[in-house]
Image: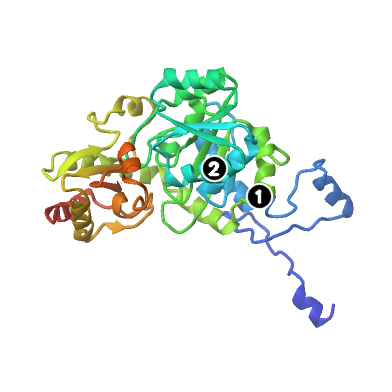
Amino acid sequence: MHFDSLCAREPKDPRTTKPHILPIYASSAYAFESAEEGMEIFTGKKSGHVYSRYGNPTIEAVASKIAALESAGTGVEAAGLLLSSGQAAVATLVMGNLKAGDKILTQGNLYGGTTELFIKQFGALGIETILTDLHELDRVEEMVKADENIRLIYFETPANPTLACVDIAALAGIAGQYGRLSAIDNTFATPCLQQPLALGVDYVVHSTTKFLNGHGNSIAGALVSRHTEQMKMGGAVWQSMKLAGTNCNPWDAWLINNGLKTLALRMERHSSNAMEIAHFLETHPAVERVNYCGLPSHPDHAIAKRQMKAFGAMLSFELKGGVEAGVKFMNGLKMCTMAPTLGDVDTLVLHPASSSHLNIPKEVRLANGITDGLVRISVGIEHAADIIADLTAALEAC
């Protein structure tokens, strides 16, 4: 070949042995050995990669790993897709299963971004969202039984930021009894602490940006389901990912895989630290109330104890001094980080009323337990004594 051609061509792959670490397949497309092979792959007669929006070896490996974690030891067969964000995972779930005229039944204290997605985006496309208290199981069953257009019961437990918990098995059972689908956002608990597929849930959503990655260096999401045919190439959910372009990229997938290697260790430390800090806060005179589902004082403690192996990293607490106390507390922190995210190895603190929920009408915030003095903490894996020392100094500033 001429010099110009040599510049443009790929070099020969020199690999002779299997790599120990998953490679990053930074390729947008894949080469066929023959025209016949390309035709067989495109028609589904032969499995193979075509274009990385359809599927990529790095991305698929990590999606399969997350599906394996969600189903480990349960006997449930599951398949997963890795998406560009947690929001993309929720959107792909809805696009792959619902149509105009269908309805979503969900809770009022859902993650705000999901609520907006349901009401603003899918509402404009003719998919209605109904908000209700999912603790009221008889009411939920009545609503599902009376309205055949309710096709999906969607929930998160523990919920953000009050850590409210709902009965996974009961809600999945209602959905299944009436031929509807159930889906859960399992971001807070992770499959280390909670495996919803074993409790009958159809779809599990994750913002892998949070605990699954754990290091705050990627944005991605995952969708796992017992409906494996819907998730495979040609299935309705896979088609939604392909056509809407909600797929992840190999670099973020690789970063998630690195984080997953220490997930079990991190969640153990996150949970033990959070329990110690929850007990500390519960006895502090500046604190009105602590929301941690591992505490017997939490109204949903019994539910959480029944369906979780441990209680995770997330907690929130109510300061007696309202917004002013919240701002003083945040400004008094030295070690803990003020950031609008969660699930990293370091402790992250947020005051919803003055930041993430600043533009939400006060009556709406209060109705969902997001009060003026509420502070949310994503407890990290630092030494618990250091976290408590920083919280103590900040609370004195209140």
The N terminus: image quadrant: bottom right
Numbered circle sitting on residue 353: none
x then y, percent, for residue 35: 88, 54
Residue ID at (24%, 51%): 383
Q: Residues within 10 Å of mark 1 (few under 14, many from 20)?
A: some
| In front of the other: 23 or 54 | 54
**Label whose residue precedes the other's in the sequence (1 or 2):** 2
Could you tell me the amino acid type at mark 2?
A: Val
Residue ID at (16%, 44%): 320
The colour mode here is: rainbow
Give the Cα separation between the discs numbered 1 and 2: 13 Å
Q: Is residue 28 left or right of residue 169?
A: right
Q: Is residue 125 left or right of residue 291?
A: right
Dot 1 and dot 2 residues touching (CB under 8 Å): no
x then y, percent, for residue 249: 59, 56
Give SS at disc 2.
helix
User: Does any portion of residue 350 appear in the rendered image?
Assistant: no
Q: Which residue is mark 2?
A: 90
| In front of the other: 116 or 274 | 116
Give SS at disc 1.
helix
Q: Which residue is mark 1?
A: 244
The part of the image, by quadrant, that contains residue 314 is top left
User: Does any portion of residue 86 appear in the rendered image?
Assistant: yes
Up the image or down, 319 lies above or below 170; here it is below
x then y, percent, for residue 131: 45, 33
x then y, percent, for residue 163: 33, 37
Q: Give the tally of numbered discs.
A: 2
